[in-house]
Image (cartoon, rainbow, N blue to C red):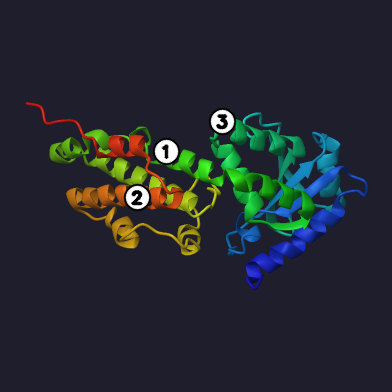
């Protein structure tokens, strides 16, 4: 990993791992976020994911912070939605976030994907960290999780694309021409931004990448890793932000339909329900 910002932060990550007491029931420790992906810059903090064989106690979470002489910022309570215990602290001037999970929570997420064929946002963030990380301990466990996920990828891709490109996820899509004709610029700009986010997430899925964050960060780096892109993708993505909203909308329409076509090609089959919804538009009314 030649990135100097990532290398500097990895040195600190190894110090943090060494600070956990011997015998701690910590099964997996990996560096996530931009550092784990090798993309770090001067703005990057250090994100670490820890997986335990039980729900960690406050004393287990605080022990390495005390050993390091770091300054605790926040000891967060358990987050039921993300099944996460987390703490923030500052070490050598660097902001550090530790996200703690149980190994059982991963097993439950994989089982849920298998049973329902869908994937939640929280699961996407977890799997993105898992697949784009620098594992410092517990590599065999992480690899076993990855292998269990692999057979379900086509099903997961279809689920993500059906969600992202559904008109329900693109507010105003079915009345887009009316919005432009009425001069509802705020609504049209909101729709265009939604299209940008949706195709970004769908293209990542088509390339077997999970969405790593709630915000579309590291856009160009992530898209640069994608071997598959829709036709005229760069042109149409840039075209979303033009000053003429009617021209921008034409870019949006082509962008969405070309992204759907790309995904259907990857999956080897049509997604007719999504296509019908995207191609529909409210009829003109007097």
Instruction: Please tell me which of labels 2 and 3 falls first in the chain.
Output: 3
Q: Are marks 2 and 3 in contact (CB under 8 Å)?
A: no
Label drawn at residue 116: 3
Say above or below: 272 vs 132: above
Please give left or right for residue 99 compared with residue 177 in the image: right
Label drawn at residue 261: 2
Most extreme residue toward the right is 23
Q: Residue 91 location in percent, x, y?
A: 75, 55
Most extreme residue toward the bottom is 2
**Cα separation between marks 2 and 3:** 24 Å
Label drawn at residue 162: 1
Q: Secondary structure at mark 1?
A: helix
Please give left or right for residue 243 compared with residue 8 in the image: left
Any part of residue 216 in sight:
no
Q: Residue 38 location in percent, x, y?
A: 62, 64
Q: Secondary structure at mark 2?
A: helix
Say above or below: 194 vs 258: above
């Amino acid at each position: 990993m030649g990135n100097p910002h990532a290398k500097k932060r990895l040195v600190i990550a190894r110090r943090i791992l060494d600070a956990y007491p011997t015998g701690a029931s910590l099964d997996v420790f990996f560096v996530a976020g931009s550092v784990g992906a090798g993309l770090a810059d001067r703005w990057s903090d250090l994100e670490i994911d820890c997986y335990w064989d039980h729900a960690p106690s406050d004393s287990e979470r605080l022990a390495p912070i005390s050993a390091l002489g770091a300054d605790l910022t926040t000891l967060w309570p358990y987050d039921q939605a993300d099944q996460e215990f987390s703490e923030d602290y500052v070490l050598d001037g660097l902001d550090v976030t530790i996200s703690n999970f149980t190994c059982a929570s991963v097993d439950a997420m994989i089982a849920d994907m298998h049973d329902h064929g869908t994937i939640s946002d929280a699961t996407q963030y977890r799997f993105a960290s898992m697949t784009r990380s620098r594992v410092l301990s517990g590599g065999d466990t992480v690899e076993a999780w990855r292998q269990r996920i692999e057979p379900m990828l086509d099903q997961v891709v279809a689920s993500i694309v059906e969600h992202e490109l559904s008109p329900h996820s693109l507010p105003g899509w079915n009345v887009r021409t009316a919005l432009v004709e009425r001069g509802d610029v705020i609504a049209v700009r909101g729709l265009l931004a939604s299209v940008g986010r949706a195709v970004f997430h769908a293209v990542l899925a088509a390339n077997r990448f999970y969405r790593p964050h709630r915000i579309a960060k590291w856009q160009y780096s992530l898209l640069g890793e994608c071997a598959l892109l829709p036709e005229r993708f760069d042109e149409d993505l840039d075209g979303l932000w033009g000053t003429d909203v009617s021209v921008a909308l034409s870019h949006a329409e082509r962008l969405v339909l070309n992204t759907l076509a790309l995904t259907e090609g990857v999956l080897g089959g049509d997604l007719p329900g999504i296509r019908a919804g995207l191609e529909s538009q409210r009829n003109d009314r007097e």
